[in-house]
Image: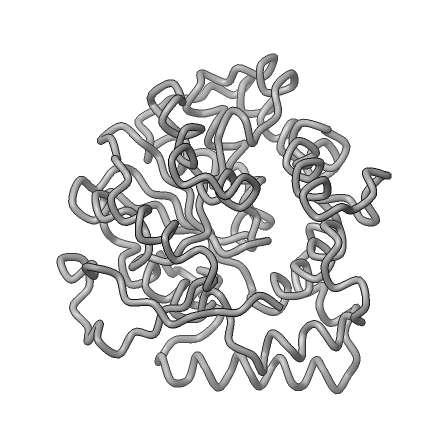
Amino acid sequence: MKSLTEYQPPRYPTNLLQKDWSKRKLHYRSERLDYIRKVHNVEVFPDDVWLVTLPKCGTTWMQELLWLVMNDFDFETAKSEHLEVRSPYMEFDYMINNDLENCFKPIEQLKRPRLIKTHLSLPLLPQQIWDKKPKVVYVARNIKDATVSEYYHARNVGAAVDKSLDEYVREEIEGTQLHDPFLHITEFYALRHEPWLFYTSFERMKLDLRQVITDVCNFLGKSIDEETMEKMLKHLSFEEMKKNPKTNHIWEFNQVRAKHGVSQTPQEFNFIRKGQMNAYREELSPEMINKIDMWVEENLKDLNVSLNELLLLNSGQK
């Protein structure tokens, strides 16, 4: 496991959330501290759309949805160009090339309005996001399902190959994580009523994708007719997304596997694998299910919020 160092940014988003930021612990990879310092001053444009999630939270699903809405439902381009080229993952270039000078070229060279994906928490985002307040979309997911999904993703890039699923989850629960999942979600949840933020969940997308598409269109000031809606529902269906080579991160996977000297043979698991709610209960041992349930319950109790609230699953909740 890569070593993590406690990190204090030059500034916190005190204009967005009134809390004691001095107690907010942040960690980043020891070998990438120069990078995260540089992120702080990344240029942000008012017409940007930033997609923020923890890993494996329906990010790709929402990213494809957003790109299509922002680009007049151009399905032909969506089917011919890799999603991660159309909408870069900000942290990816430095992860692969370790080039501080050019690491933001993929987002700097992107045609505006830009759609940029990141997994960074609120206080680690470019500070101009806090001030300029471009459109931000946040997707939460049941932390238990996301943690299980991360295991299979790690195996695909040559990590965690010597660990069982239970062992991986235990380490995630007991160790120091790159991003505290509970604070990552709850800080954006606290901002969910801000006009520049669209907050939703993987579970809401599973339960009513049509409504989420409608809500995203409204958020971005776009209209959609019924014929286009039907095309969107088909294109974004689990079956279509799973078999679509342009949404399975093949472009990124090939670079990651090459960097780590992993065979370029087909991935052990498809990037879009199950796409189910509460699938963790089918895959973890009873002991680990109990452990992860307690882990989530205890952390959210301290934050005075329930998992259903964070996932927008409470009846009548906005």
Please give the count of numbered marks on the rendered protein: 0
Name the residue at the right extreme: 265
In front here: 203 or 43? 43
Q: Is residue 277 visible?
A: yes
Depicted 267 relative to depicted 77: above or below: below
The C terminus appears in which quarter of the rendering? bottom left
* Residue 33 image offset from top left, x and y in percent: 39, 58
Q: Say whether residue 193 is left or right of residue 309.
A: left
Name the residue at the left extreme: 15
Q: Residue at x 79, y 69 (%)?
A: 283
In front here: 318 or 50? 50
* Residue 112 image offset from top left, x and y in percent: 34, 20
* Residue 40 image offset from top left, x and y in percent: 27, 49
Q: Say whether residue 193 is left or right of residue 144.
A: left
In front here: 223 or 104? 104
Location of residue 286 (image quadrant): bottom right
Q: Residue at x 16, y 68 (%)?
A: 18
Q: Is residue 211 visible?
A: no
Q: Residue at x 69, y 40 (%)?
A: 253
Depicted 252 relative to depicted 24: above or below: above
The N terminus appears in which quarter of the rendering? bottom right
Q: Say whether residue 263 is left or right of residue 195.
A: right
Depicted 174 relative to depicted 198: above or below: below
Location of residue 121 (image quadrant): bottom left
* Colouring convention used in this rendered image of the protein: one colour
* Residue 193 image offset from top left, x and y in percent: 25, 53
